[in-house]
Image (cartoon, grey):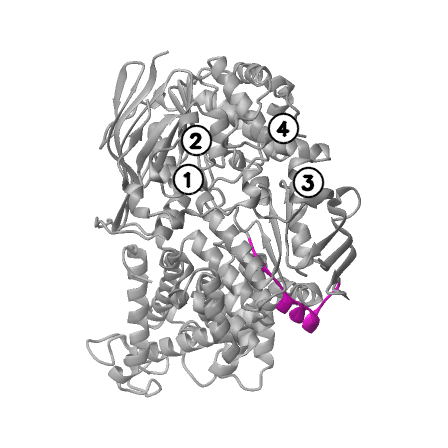
Amino acid sequence: MSLRGLSPRFWISATLIIVIVLIALLGPLLVSIDPNATIGGLYDRPRCCGTMLLGTDNEGQSVLANLVYGTRTSLIVGLLAGVIATVIGLLIGLVSGYRGGWIDDLLTAVTNVGLAIPAIVVIILVSVSLPKRNIYTLALVIGLTAWFWVARAVRAQASSVRTREHIDVARLSGAGFWSILARDILPYLLSYVVMAAVLQVSGAILFESTLSLLGLGPGDATSLGTMLYWAIAWGSVRTGAWWAFVPPTLMLTLIVFSLLLLQSSLNEVFNPRLRRGRAARKKTKLSAADEEAIERSRPEVVGAAGLLETPASSGTEAR
Amino acid sequence: MGTLVDARNIRGVYYLGGKDLVAVDDVSVRIEEGEVLGLAGESGSGKTTLGSIISLIARPPLHVEQGTLEIDGKVQELGGDAKIPRTWRGAVVSMLPQGAMNSLSPTKRVRHLVYDVLRSHDRKITKDEALDRARERITTLGLPARVLDAYPHQLSGGMKQRTVTIISTLLNPRLLVADEPTSALDVTSQKILIEMLLEMLDKKIMSGVIFVTHDLPVLRTVASKIAVMYEGRIVERGPTEVMVDHPQHPYTQALMSSVLAPEPKYTRTRIEGMSSFDRKLFNAPEVIHR
Amino acid sequence: MSAIYTVEHLTKTFGHGKAAVHAVEDVSFDLAAGGITVIVGESGSGKSTVARMLLGLLPVTSGRLVFQDKDVTHLKGHARTAYWRDVQAVFQDPFSSFNQFFTVGTLLSRSVRLVGRDVGKQRLEESLGHVGMDLSVLDRYPHQLSGGQRQRVMIARALMMRPKLLIADEATSMLDASLRVNILNVLKDLRDELGMTILFITHDIGQACYLADRILVMENGAMIEQGPTDEVIFNPQHEYTKRLLADVPKLHTAIELGDLHESVETP
């Protein structure tokens, strides 16, 4: 899959995400102090440079250090929860969409119930009743409540791929149930699944922040959400200590924005025909299949202006 | 009977981001008044591309690098950045694309397409006038007027194809380019469509037809002249019966001999496909039968 | 020749009540072992539905299918997988019957696994040879092959199982005329060299004339005429068959075109 001709959207979002990940991975090494270490008083103003770059929070800890560690926590929770939700939704959607019958009916019923119940309520109730709240249990809870949407979407796609002829050929070749799912259906859905996963991760990050903001966050780690919780609880908004709430808010916004931007540009990555870009002109001998494909892609040419438009030909008659 | 359309030195190239495909390579073709010219060839021969260039609807990635079109004494430059007058499309030359009958909007009645077509050329025409014109044309050509009020799924394949054929000629174009109009139809509907096309020519609804297809027996029935294309060039052209019974060019000979028909000679013999012909011979120079 | 396959009163109905579609109605026929039988019908005749039922890909509404004296009407699970060792198929669209992510080698490796490694490798080379191809095609992707090449690979895939019956459903309809003859010749060779029984489905009576030992004509779900090729084509009995033969365009004789206003309207 070449990376030529991708729009600015893709490059900007990819760069942003790489920067954020680097902050999360390398930041703690560069900032080199414990985020829980007291280095100043209540809401000390920012001073250049070093650990006081963003001032101190309500406990006299470095906001910069907390920001860096908080980004890492939020990303870890988001990634874990997003992956859990995607994997579960993918499995259930695949089996449901391909198998059909009573299994499909059962799984669809479960999915529909899950979709109807507001996830935020479930998450809050479950979190409140958890004996121990750390980033892993939180990620699990978020993941287990978010897979329904993925399952429904994957099911729809799987049941449409199921009707294609290469599935019949696979069955006639003696391929088993799981083999067909993994090799004949999943690859056709992969682009969709990747885009869904990106959305899941960004959604999970927001969910975690919401929980933390409500005081239900991880008990043993700082996240961007917990920073905001303390910032609000200790009145930094009221007293104008902007360095306590603006940095985590900006970082959260940046993370979610770049993930959504990436997701919207992934269409081009997976579908090279949507890319724009100056075509280099080079004369090359084309294979017979290329020429056939050209004839088949004729619809770009055809379309008697305003008279009769033809839809993308499926290759049936194009000669 | 004079020359209706004279297309000269047409060169059409697909610009494909790194590779160029020369689809039509310096082709000239002429259609006389009242004539059906069959444009035959296989996948990749360029026949559809040539048809879309002549009917003035070529769009990127297809670029017409050079060529001229002469109709009724007016010469139109096709190559490079030439501006095609809007009024020509549909009214001077009209195209009936392949698969047109399947692209009727399923949620609109057929008469909506009629409005769109007629309005695109004459903003002042009212819906009633448009409908009357269409109705008159449709009944003259043997279809019931109710077709206009129907949804596409209520019509059979044959009726849909005849309907779109009529709609694409509502503006009385001089030339109709029809791309595989019979390919998706069953045998009886094919015959009726051919009969309708010939009657339209007789009534001078249009004055000439280019019939693009890979189906040679259909051309035997409908075309007065046949031109065979191979790899972007016309390799042989002449009157239908001569082309079919006495082809001279190696490619045409190979093509004609691979046609199967329900006739006695096909039940016992073995016919060899094109792979047994020497493909180098296919690049032999063009044969023109006068 | 004895019948290798017997179809009795086969019926397929989609939907219920007023919206019911009777795709296939009370169709009965035999397939003679080692011969080529062609079902000819236009779109909507039900011919492809018959093929899918014979293949076990579509459940039967009513009727009986008997293969080699065993009832195979309602097969499931292992019994159906075993059935697919003896009955194989080639479909119409050479593009969509290929998993575009597979090379030819990957596609055929499934069949190799099914018959066992050693036997499989040998059969792979033989099957490709039967369709005029060699092992060099194994690492090509479908988009690197032409339509005709893809269909031949599909036939090779079907041959890997050494089936007794090969069902080809409109296998040539999307190919150019010149390639069609090649595929039809491959099928003829399979009959002559391997004694394979072949059921070929098509709308093109010209191809049926070239290929078939027996022809079955279907219209609107019913089988309206059947018999040896010579009889059906040169001495048709049913009105539909006669009309079909008269209306099909021929290369060396012009068909009779009538007055547009007197031609029979297709409903």
Q: Amino acid at mark 4?
A: Ala
Q: Is residue A222 above or below residue A87?
A: below
Q: Amino acid at mark 1?
A: Leu
Q: Could you tell me which chain the residue with mark 1 belongs to?
A: B
Q: Amino acid at mark 2?
A: Val
Mark-to-mark CA distance, 3 and 2? 28 Å
**Which structural element holds mark 3?**
helix
| Range of magenta residues | C74-91
* Labels 3 & 2 near each other (Cβ < 8 A): no
The percent position of residue C86, horizontal first and vertical second, equals 64, 67
**Which structural element holds mark 1?**
helix
Q: Nearer the viewer, residue B29 or B236?
A: B236
* Labels 4 & 2 near each other (Cβ < 8 A): no
Mark-to-mark CA distance, 3 and 1? 29 Å
CA neighbours of label 2 inside 10 A, class few (<14), some (14 to 19), many (20+): many
Mark-to-mark CA distance, 4 and 1? 41 Å
Residue C231 badge? 3
* Labels 3 & 1 near each other (Cβ < 8 A): no
The residue that label 1 is drawn on is: B255
The percent position of residue C256, horizontal first and vertical second, equals 58, 23
Mark 4 on the same chain as mark 2: yes
- Confirm whether residue C139 shows in the render: yes
The residue that label 4 is drawn on is: B150
Q: Could you tell me which chain the residue with mark 4 belongs to?
A: B
Where residue C20 sits, quadrant-wise, is top right
Residue B244 badge? 2
